Image: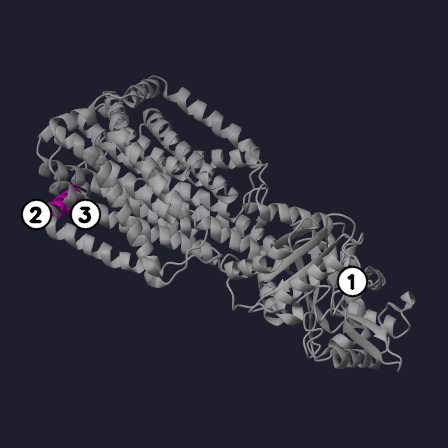
Amino acid sequence: MYLARQSAMMERYIRWVVRHRWAVACTVLGISILLATQLSHLRLEIRRRAALPQEHPYVQIQNRISDLFGGEAVVIIGVIANHGDIFTPAILGKIHRITAGLRHTAGIVDSSLFSLAAPHVEAVTVGGDGMMDVHPLMEKPPATLEQARQLRATIQSDKLLHGNLVSKDGTATVIVAEFDDRMTDVGIATRIEEVVGPERDTTVTIALAGAPILRAGLTRYTALIAVLFPIAVVVIGLIHYEAFRTRQAVFLPLVTALLSVVWALGIMGMTGQPMDTRSAITPVVILAVAAGHAVQILKRYYEEFALTGDSEKAVIRSVTAVGPVMLTAGLIASAGFGSLVTFGVASVRVFGMLLALGILSALFIEMTFTPACRCLLPAPQRREVQREGQSLWLDRWLDRLADLIVERPRVVLAVVLLMVLTSATGVFRIEVDNSFRLWFSPATQVRKDDAVLNERLPGTASLRLLVEGQEENVLQQPAVLQAMSDLEQFLEAEPNIGGVSSIADHVKRMHQAMHDGDPAFYTIPDNPRLISQYLLLYGMSAGPDALSAFVDASYQHAVVRGLSKTDSATFSRQLIQRLQAYAQQRFRDLPVSVGIAGGTLGVQTAMNDVVVREKVVNVMQVSAIIFVLSAIVLRSLIGGVFVLLPLLCAVVVNLGLMGWMHIWLDMTTAAITSMGVSIGADFAIYLIFRMREELARTATVDAAIRASLRTSGKAVFFVSSAVALGYLVLPLSGFSLWIRLGTLTAVIITVSALATLTVIPSLVLVTRPRFVARRQGTGDVEPVRRAAGE
């Protein structure tokens, strides 16, 4: 009786829509226009902290370091001599001009500017009066080759600068610039290019790296969605034409889908939510999903119109039959995407909520505007109906598939199981990594620059360790500074780590300088008063902010900085574990704590932890949501299992393919699982409901399966094709992240559709579940075995 009441309610509703078709269509269009006015508020913004799991301790350490010492917007500029070394007046002049240009840039943190010509990069010597003399290393560029050689000698004798600021062979130097929040990443990248551009010539190679450069490149690629989206519209339109062979049937799903996109983006603009790389693809997702639901309705409309010859009756009968199924499938997909709000990364939560709202908007439009507009359009001509219903290659393929399933269901299940098990072997080969720079193709300039900098200089991936004391001036104690120095030596022993520095190095430089530069005194003094005097003299000579990039004014908080030539997940995790163990032992009896780890290595390790932990939780959430809702609407726990099984096949095949193709599981590819499962659930819901309907009409399982594959199966094919090919537009961007995203999403959707069309009918024939025989309109339960005449 439940299904009878549901059908009656849907019929009363759709009759109301048909009677008020003009009012309904105008209302939806009015809301669409209102939301379209909010599109002007949309903006692209790759937010610095939104993509990070804020609850993870490594990210919290990074945020703490950034708040104390900066470090969220750091650009690394490498100046590399193409011939000889950098110690020529011409090249040193370039370095000086680049540094001066950076100092005149809005938002630059002058105290953190690290360069041969930076005011806070000083040479430390003893003056004629025996006092410490601290002066800029290169206040002005050398005018002669001899002056350039003197600068080289000064750097080579300084352990802090040699190998960190300048490569050990003297052929390259680094400029590190940090910016505050006054400029966007795109603004920073643009300004950097304005500064370094005039200095590029055949004598030097100037390479750029750092998070602002990467995020600016990401913003440029994200903007390509404005080009890719129209291509996706054309591709999906062509698929619809192949499905219906009529212009009306192409027009209506696309209009419905485009309105759904306007609603979703309008809501985004209304809430002031910026678009990032993930949310930028929501228009393609919503377009494909919304158009897919419209295809299901229109396919049924043409079936009913062929029977009745009356467009209004066909609309009522088609929506009455398909409407409950579409609402069920749409709500399941929306709930699946909505479950991403529990994810520990803000940008993923926004992505999930926007998709959930977009699908809900599509459902509302498809249950109002689509039937109203269908009634307002002229009824299909006989020729259109004939073209839509004529036998296609797909019909012949589906008929052969039905023959195979009906005749050999166990063989079909065995083949599917074998394919899934074969794919499953690749799951164990999956590696988890979240390297930001690997979102870009090796052929892009950012990847080329990154490779050059890692080859010639200490590295481009950062590592930050936070040392916090229990009281002020604790970082002037010899034992604490010696422990920090020992921690640096432990880090420097790692072959991929370089550029390690802290306040301890500066104290050792001062101690050496005050002993006529004798290398034997490059040590931490054992007298705290002497250390305090050194720091006082240094501050008096160089200024109060001279060491602010390494220690705060109270000498209670300090940061140890390092660079790495690799940011692989395996290396990062093992290094951080070794550092934690060493720091726990070395600082055990000291009045300080060591926070490990911030920087690129710490953040990416945190991302890996989140992917592994929260992705498992999220997949379980989505699966539970699909199972519960499917079991409720089908009134059968076995029915919920039937819906999940094709999705499980698709997930295993997708993950196995990633393992065999060495595609890393990162924050983006991990989200594909939830996306594929949420969308793929639609296919199973539509097919099962159609099988139940056909079984009530034909009273034989074989006939019901054949009819379901010919009708709902055909719709599933075209819907999955539209989604898959719509996503395959993304690889046209040349953006590695979108290439993987588009390809893997197309695979999981395709496998989900194929698994639905094979596994579910075969299981029905083998297991004869009672829920499939639940008759439409009466609520009576009749075993499939009896319906099949057994």
- Quadrant (top left, top right, bottom left, bottom right) of the C terminus: top left
Q: Earlier in the sequence, mark 3 or mark 2?
A: 2
169, 391: nearer the viewer: 169
Separation (CA) of disc 1 from disc 2: 81 Å
The quadrant in which residue 163 appears is bottom right
Report crowding for label 2: few under 14, some 14 to 19, many 20 or more residues within 10 A (C-alpha): few
Q: Residue furthest front?
A: 144
Q: Earlier in the sequence, mark 3 or mark 1?
A: 1
The quadrant in which residue 715 appears is top left
Q: Is residue 451 left or right of residue 349?
A: right
Which residue has dot 1 on it? Answer: 161
| CB within 8 Å, label 3 to label 1 | no
Q: Secondary structure at mark 2?
A: helix
* Three-letter amino acid code at the position of disc 2: Arg
577, 700: nearer the viewer: 577
Q: Earlier in the sequence, mark 1 or mark 2?
A: 2
The magenta segment: 4-16
* Three-letter amino acid code at the position of disc 3: Phe
In this picture, is 690 found above or below 149? above
Q: Position of residue 716 (x, y in %)?
A: 31, 33
| CB within 8 Å, label 3 to label 2 | no
User: Which mark, by number, is residue 369?
Assistant: 3
What's the residue at 82%, 74% (across, down)?
A: 478
Which residue has dot 2 on it? Answer: 19
Q: Secondary structure at mark 3?
A: helix
Count the labels in the image.
3
255, 661: nearer the viewer: 255
| CB within 8 Å, label 1 to label 2 | no
In this picture, is 307 found above or below 158? above
Q: Position of residue 286 (x, y in %)?
A: 33, 46
Q: Is residue 480 magenta?
A: no
